[in-house]
Amino acid sequence: MWTGVLPAVTTKFTPDGDLDHAEMERCFALQLEAGCDGLIVCGSLGEGPMLSQDERLAVLRTAQGVAGGRPVLLTVSEAGTREACALASRAARAGASGLMVVPSPIYHTDEAETVATLRAVAAAGDLPVLIYSNRVAYRVDVTPRIMAELAADPRFVAIKESSDDIRRTTEIINHLGDRYAILTGVDNLALEALTVGAVGWVAGLVCAFPRETVALYRLLRAGRLAEALALYRWFRPLLDLDVSTYLVQNIKLAEAIALGSTEHVRAPRLPLAGSRRAQVEATVRRALEHRPAV
């Protein structure tokens, strides 16, 4: 469950802003048909903070319906620990395979508060936990020292490493060995992370380019570095779209172009427009023109 490609899937909406379960089923199925190893729903890419808890559980059920027994994780990213615990408990009752947990997306917790929050959510859900460490977006750094403090609890099983510092993967391994499965969470550092010890990839551009993402991961795991590097160099301009304030809109536009999906987002987000839209369109169309066989 903690190796392979786990797409952080986008949430699909109708033009009126309701959940579009039919389009989610279609797009989630494309991920799994391409060989992805599970799904993660309602993260930042899935606009989780813009969804009610009831909506997030509805998206979870839709993903479970197409997963074919592969794991489906629900993201817990609440401003308050009480609300995070309530969602974790509901996810467990709904049959989630595990949780991806952000310590606190609003208040920037200190070390003691980070540990307390993660422990509370893990206890409430009593499910395997993928800790989402993203000091860039959420300003809470789950350091190797914090990971060591949590290591006695077997519910903490994996780290989504998104510090934007490729040295962190090696630091975790040097401090903790193989205690945690490390999954890279930064698309345009994926090759680097997977070559220094990460065993999984929580991917974003996979939503629009699932076959290429799976192929890159499998080439790296097979030690076929030269082939992987050639594919990665083609992929890099696309992967850069994941490292942006506008990652949701970027990836939804890429899905619309590459897969015929929709771009609908939930306010306050708006679809891309103007020069920013033109740049993303040009990047995607250029990649499609030179798309390699995989």
Image (cartoon, rainbow, N blue to C red):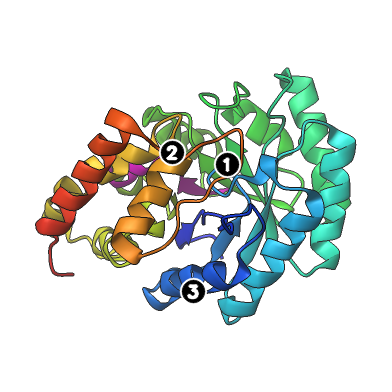
x and y percentages locating residue 145 in the rendered image: 63, 26
Q: Label 1: which residue?
A: 44
Is label 1 in contact with label 2 (beta carbons under 8 Å)?
yes
Q: What element carries label 1?
A: loop
Give the spatial CA distance, label 1 vs label 3: 20 Å
Q: Which amino acid does label 3 sit on?
A: Arg
x and y percentages locating residue 71 in the rendered image: 60, 69
Of the image marks 1 and 2, the number of the one nearer the N terminus = 1
x and y percentages locating residue 126 in the rendered image: 83, 56
Q: Label 3: which residue?
A: 26
Is label 1 in contact with label 3 (beta carbons under 8 Å)?
no
Tell me which segment is drawn in magenta.
180-191
Give the spatial CA distance, label 1 vs label 2: 9 Å
Q: Label 2: which residue?
A: 247
Q: What element carries label 3?
A: helix
Q: Which amino acid does label 1 sit on?
A: Ser
Query: Which image quadrant for residue 56?
Result: bottom right
